[in-house]
Amino acid sequence: MFEWEWWEDHNTFRLFIILLLKANHEDGKWCGHDIKRGQLITGRLELAKASGLSAQCVRTSLNRLKSTSELTSQPTNRFSLITI
């Protein structure tokens, strides 16, 4: 972890740890959607509340994590399916 490029970016690091902790540890279903291991359904406002970051900081950190292929995101009009 100490060598990870986002180690010193406190917002991105904090958000990534929250995503790891919230991600499914086994396959499951939610409201008719298949949620696989390593995935979670969430939204920016929910992540902002959980992390104590602003919605803009969450958006920026998610984009940084996507840019380095740490995660992918499939947005809908109600939530996002994030895969770590």
Image: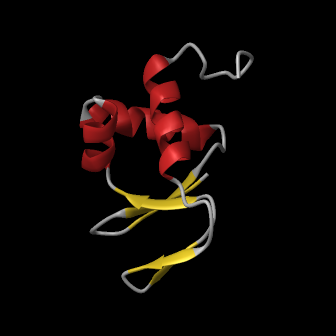
Residue 77, image x and y in percent?
28, 69
Relative depth, front residue between 43 and 64: 43
Residue 55, image x and y in percent?
26, 37
Residue 50 in the figure: left or right of residue 70: left
Residue in view at x 27 percent, y 68 percent: 78
Q: Residue furthest bottom?
A: 32
How many numbered markers are drawn? 0
Residue in view at x 71 percent, y 15 percent: 2
Up the image or down, 83 lies above or below 58; here it is below
Which corner quadrant of the image does residue 67 belong to? top right
Relative depth, front residue between 14 and 77: 14
Residue in view at x 31 percent, y 39 percent: 50
Residue 73, image x and y in percent?
50, 57
Residue in view at x 37 percent, y 57 percent: 42
Look at the image and name its color scheme: secondary structure
Residue 59, image x and y in percent?
37, 39
Residue 23 in the figure: left or right of residue 70: left
Up the image or down, 41 lies above or below 5; here it is below
Which corner quadrant of the image does residue 76 belong to? bottom left
Quarter of the rendering occupied by the N terminus = top right
